[in-house]
Every structure is written in structure tokens, then in C-alpha cells.
Image (spheres, helix red, strand yellow):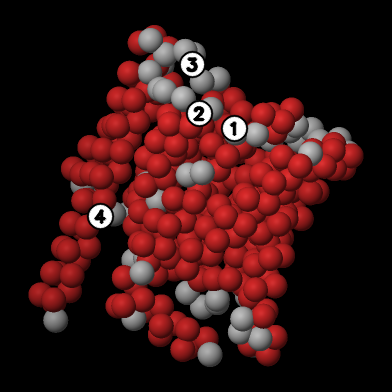
Amino acid sequence: MVKCHRAVLMHPASRATGVPLVLLAASLWATVGVAAQLVPAASEFPPEILGFARTAIAGPVLLLVAIIVPGPKAIRLTRLNPAGLVVFATSNAIFQIGLFRCFAILGVTVTVYLTVCLPPLMAMVWNWLRQRESVGVGNVLALAHAVTGLWLIGHGFAFGGTGMPSSEGIVMAIIASLAFVTMTDAARTLGRTEPPLLITGAGLTLSSALLLLTLPVIGVASLSVMTAALGDPTILGLAIYLGLGPTALAYVCYCAGIARCRSVLVGLIASMIEPAIAAVLAISILSDKPSMAEAVGCSLLMIAILILWQSERGLARRRIEAASAAS
């Protein structure tokens, strides 16, 4: 069964679905910040509650579907990698905390651009260090555009912006981005041999358990605070939407898609549609209009990822040509 699953994922037709699945997941994720801002009552409670609620709803739902669709017998034949699952769950828990804190500190637009644009660049640098690959001109240009864009976003107040993001928000965005890269790598490794539904369901369920244990440490002193928050119909409705849409469905699509992508970097680049959609939603629904400097900074980040995408494609083409010449 495992060998058959591997064969399906490695088939060219299956690989072709990788990027579209990641794009669908990114489109769903783009609605998270806007949805949270549309519920004013959510700002009265610690932001980590929404991170816990979305994973606590999505995880068990996906586990149930994972058991019903293939049947209990097929699940018993599955052997999840415990270490990989723990890495996925821990990274996801850290990402949820960082993400919702950034929404509260930095706002929707800046948070989305930082937490989406930083991971591909981090993956690029990690590939340099781990694989000791040569640094190409495209990589340097991408990094230069990204650094300039981040500087403009951070210092937009000096050019007509409303304020400068606090250091706490920037640090949280960096931590969340690192966690997302780690989670992506774990999801890609697990997804090569196991069903995405089971991986996501088990990973999110474990992540919600970790978040529940962490809540008292990060400021939610008692379960009564969380109960009061989820007792509000608007917050409960928001939690259900976040749990089923941008979490359950999105994470299944992402885990399935990233496993089919040629590399983690390709999958992360494909997820870059998220900030564009989030910006459109924030501007049209929340009237969250960035300053000129912030808009230019975000544009530079997008250009950096496009340069990185072209550089990655060129590298893959050269590897294929080298392999063909060697054979």
C-alpha cells in the first residue's frame, strides 16, 4: 500500500497537481486575518485562543474523515513517523501563536506579507547552508529586493505611513516564518509515504493539545477565559469557519500539494498568491490601505519571489541538462 502511494505521488500527472493544490490552500489562508478582523469581539480575548480553536476543530474532523474514507483497516496499516509528526505539530503550534499575535500587533497586510514572503527566502538561505550550493545572481537579486522591501515596510511611517511595526511584532513574524518552514519540510517528508488527511488530522490534533498546554504559560490563565470567548456566538462562528475552511481543507490541500512539489522552495513560492489575495480583501473589506512606502515594499517582496522562482526553474533546467549530458 505504501509503495503504491509512493508511486502515485511520483507520477508526473500527480506532480502536476502539486502547485495548484498549494495555490488553493494559500487562497484559503488569505481569508484568516480578514475574517478575524471582521469579528470585533475577537480582539477582546487573547489571540492564541483562535489559534487553538482552529486546530482543535480541524484536527478531529480530519482524523474522522481519514478513518471513514479509506476505512479503519487501511489506517491500521499506516505507520506515521512519530518524530516527523511531533515536528509538524510543534511547528504548527508555534506558527499559530506567532500568526495571531502578529495580526494583533502589525495588522493583516503587514503580517501576511511578512509570514508569506519570509519563508521562501529562509528556505533559500537554508539550502545554501545545508547543500552548500553556489549562490547565483538571481538569488542575490531576490535577497536584495526582499531586504529593501522589508525595510520599506518597517520604516513606512517615515514616508507617510501610520506607524512603525514594533520590534515584538517583527520578532514574532520571524519566529512564525521559521516555524512555517519547519512545518512545511515535515509535511513534505510525511506526505511522501502517508495519506495527507491522516497526516494533517493527527498533526493538527496534536498541535491543539500542545496549544492547550501552552495557553496558561503565554497569558491565558484559565480555561474560563477560553470558554467565555468561545461562548460568544460570533467568535464561535469565526472559530468554526477558521477550523473547517482555512485550516482543515487548506492544510489537506497544502500537505498533499507540498508532497508533490519538486522541492519545499517550489511549494513555498507557490503559496505567494496568499498576500496578493489578502491585500485585495483587506483593502476592499477592511479599508486597510497601505502607505505608498508599504505598497512599494510589498511589491518588492513579490518581485523578489518571482526572481527566486525564475532562479529555481533555471537551476532545475541546468541539472536536467547536466544529467542528460552525463548519461
**Relative to 276, is 320 on the left or the right?**
left
| Residue for badge 2 | 286
Q: Name the residue under label 4.
A: 312
Which image quarter is the C terminus in? bottom left
- To which residue does mark 1 refer? 37
Q: In this view, does 198 lie above or below 119?
A: below
Per the model, the C-alpha gap separating discs 4 and 3 is 33 Å
- Identify residue type, mark 1: Gln
Q: Is mark 1 on a helix, strand or loop?
A: helix
Would you say residue 199 is visible in this rendering? Answer: yes
How crowded is the residue under tag 3: few (<14 C-alpha within 10 Å), some, or many (20+)?
few
Among the 4 quarters of the image, the one containing residue 316: bottom left
Q: How crowded is mark 4: few (under 14 residues within 10 Å), some or many (20 or more)?
A: many
Which marked residue is nearer to the observer: mark 4 or mark 1? 1
Dot label at residue 53: none
Q: Is residue 31 above or below residue 267?
A: above
* Residue 79: % across, % down: 63, 80
**In-image side of 291 versus 170 (left or right):** left
| Residue 164: assigned label | 3
Quarter of the image for residue 279 reads top left
| Labels 3 and 1: the sequence-earlier one | 1
Mark 2: amino acid: Leu
Residue 45 position, x and y percent, is: 75, 32
Marks 1 and 2 sit apart, C-alpha to C-alpha, by 8 Å
Seen at 51% across and 78% down, the residue is: 193
User: Do the CB atoms of the residues marked 1 and 2 lie less than 8 Å apart?
Assistant: yes
Is residue 151 in view?
A: no
Q: Is residue 193 left or right of residue 11?
A: right
